[in-house]
Image (cartoon, rainbow, N blue to C red):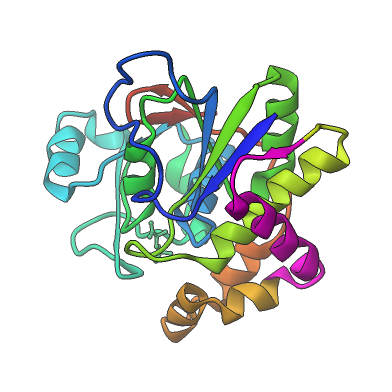
Amino acid sequence: MDCFVYHTPELTPDLSVPPKDNAPVDCAIVVDVLRATTTIATALSTGAEAIQAFADLNRLKTAGAAWEKELCILSGERGGNKVAGFDLGNSPLDYSSDRVKGKRIFMSTTNGTRALQRVQHAPVMLTAALVNVGAIVKTIIDRQFASIWIVNSGWQGDYSLEDTVCAGALLHHLQAAGVEVNAGNDEAIAAIALYKSWSDNLLELLRQASHGQRLLRLQKDADLEYCAAVSTLDIVPYQSELGVLMA
Ligand code: 3SL
């Protein structure tokens, strides 16, 4: 399996529009460990009907207003904080079953939703975080993709340690399951090496990462602990229609 890792949406070949010829990849996997894809996995595992992602807050509000009010949750994060007037921010711990069961979550985050848009025309799009690595690895193996892109969200165009370690976890666990992983770029090799050196202490890696530090300054210690746990959720978020993620 040809495996590429991209550190940011901007570095990822553009699949925000349909490809002219054959798709350049079978499956794109978007990663934003802190915290968008962890929140997506959590919300779907606690029974949200779907997550509908938007880069633009005004488009989000318009779509949410057209949805049945009792079944709509507005979820917005900018700079780590909840957007004023929204129901929820981006803390996965807030997405409990009693808040989200049966509801559609209209979500916008600083980086994660931009990464989703960047590859929205991939033939298959999944989202991964440390919490659902095992479920994603199993799906990749079952679907027998010939090629995958792991698309890290990064932080405002910059590299992020926590997304890279998750990319490495995915590739390492594919290898451990006997898949022949052909690293398509150096980023894939580096991601595996990063995961191997930190796999016993992922929480500490998240604490040292620049976005982890930002979240710690916002008193989000419990979020970091939650996001650092590996394969605690057996859930595979996939894009069912443009911009909509379901389990
Ligand atoms: O950048 C994003 O998409 C967010 O996940 C950032 S935060 O962790 O919610 O601050």
Q: Position of residue 29 (x, y in %)?
A: 53, 38
- Decide if residue 1 is on the left or right side of residue 129: right
Give the residue furthest to the bottom: 217
Task: Check residue 184 for magenta coloring.
Answer: yes
For the stretch drawn in magenta, what is the main secondary structure? helix
- Name the residue rendered at 72%, 52% in the picture: 169
* Front-most of residues 86 and 14: 14
- Name the residue rendered at 61%, 53% in the picture: 186
- Asked which quadrant contains residue 106, the reply is top left
Does residue 104 appear anywhere in the picture?
no
* Front-most of residues 56 and 61: 56
* Front-most of residues 75 and 35: 35
Task: Check residue 123 for magenta coloring.
Answer: no
- Ligand 1 is found in which quarter of the picture? bottom left
- Name the residue rendered at 46%, 61% in the picture: 91
Q: Position of residue 5 (x, y in %)?
A: 56, 47
Q: Position of residue 85 (x, y in %)?
A: 18, 59
Magenta stretch in the rendered image:
181-202
51 up-or-down from 57: above or below: above
- Decide if residue 145 is on the left or right side of residue 240: right
- Asked which quadrant contains residue 79, the reply is bottom left
Does residue 201 appear anywhere in the picture?
yes
Q: Position of residue 175 (x, y in %)?
A: 82, 41
- Decide if residue 166 is on the left or right side of residue 53: right
* Front-most of residues 42 and 242: 242
- Could you tell me which quadrant the N terminus lies in? top right
- Asked which quadrant contains residue 201, the reply is bottom right
- Decide if residue 72 is on the left or right side of residue 150: left
